[in-house]
Amino acid sequence: MTRAGSGSLPRYIFQRIVLVIPMIWVILTLVFFVLRVAPGDPVSAALGSKLNPQALAQARERLGFNRPLIAQYWDYLSSVAHLDFGTTFSDNQPVLRVVRDNGGATLSLTLAAFVIALAVGIPLGLVAGRYRDSVGDVAIRLFGIVSYAAPIFFVGFLLQLYVAPPLGLPTSGDASPITIFEVKPKTHILLIDVFLSGNGAAIQDVLKHLVLPAVTLGLLICGVFIRLVRVNMLMTMQADYVEAAEARGIRRRNVTWRHAFRNALVPVITVVGLQFALLLGGAVLTETTFNWPGLGQKLVLYINNRDYGAVQGIVTVFAIAVVLISLLVDIINALIDPRVRF
């Protein structure tokens, strides 16, 4: 008979790591075959306007598209296993270099959006659950539904039109040209580089550029956290141990914060990992709306150029990142709540 306890945690982590391998394999397989069954020749689509027929044939042979599909598939898996995500067709760059140069902007935007979503969603969900069916509860629930359902580009345009002018916030890019010129890239993440530079004006400039895109993206998942925290607060407030605490004369505020709120947050941690994938998808639209120089905007550019090599590599990196973050969230969840290990 298995006993609950800390001894089962290593086994749980081992099982989750083992499951990651088939998950990544399925994702890689889908990415490869979905792009291969798309109509048209990818090499001609990306380079047809730049090369003559003879040069196109040489490029097709150099990129391995003359080989059998199963051989291409095996080469693709082998390359990914060696952390080689291929080369872009249109500008002949390693995909990892594209990810390095543009991923920092996407990471800064995603993390800032996450902070906003948690900072707004959790307190509002707590208030809605604590004061169930009140006017505030109805208003918060309505806000959550609207923020989740509204198209992200529409929210972005509204903020650009009605919020940016009175507050003097930039509506495009991640920094002014003078900031980009003055700050020397050290980490390829501009937000970190400006803090390392100690340039106050540059820091202020970068933070101003970050506000509107981060708020737009943060609102996308804010409603999810509101609803989740509210529902879990309602369920926790009806639990036996909460009623027992109140029966012992513990003040309602202490019961809410020390017992109900902490337990209501456990499911939120699980959802955080799932919402990360949603944020990456939303980052593509947000970066396009605000001309944010991140990986999402780069991906749209490669899709427009029909550069399948770049699209395949970037989507693969996205997919692996989501799987690894889900693994991390599962491990953190198991550390907090031993029940999920079984």
Image: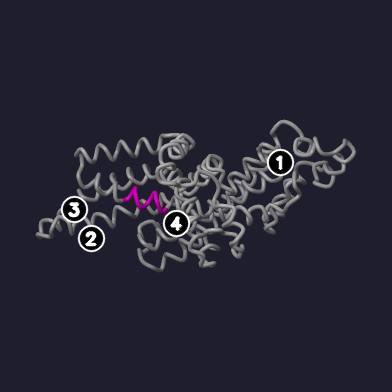
Q: Tell me which residue sits at (67%, 55%) in the image.
A: 96
Viewer-closest of 235 and 190: 190
Q: Amino acid at mark 1?
A: Asp
Q: Which residue is rendered at x = 69% and y = 46% of the image?
A: 310
- Tell us which disc is closer to us: 1 or 3: 1
Determine whether label 1 and label 3 are within 8 Å by CB: no
Looking at the rendered image, the disc whose residue lies closer to the viewer, 2 or 1, is 1
Q: Which element carries disc 4, helix, strand or loop?
A: helix
Which secondary structure dominates the residues rendered in magenta? helix
Q: Measure the C-alpha gap from mark 3 to mark 4.
A: 27 Å
Q: Label 1: few (<14), some or many (≥20) within 10 Å?
A: many
Frontmost of labels 2 and 4 is 2
Name the residue carrying label 3.
Answer: 240
Q: Residues within 10 Å of mark 3 (few under 14, many from 20)?
A: few
Disc 1 designates what residue?
Answer: 307
Q: Which mark is residue 330?
A: 4
Left-right relation of 142 to 64: left
**C-alpha distance separating marks 2 and 4:** 24 Å
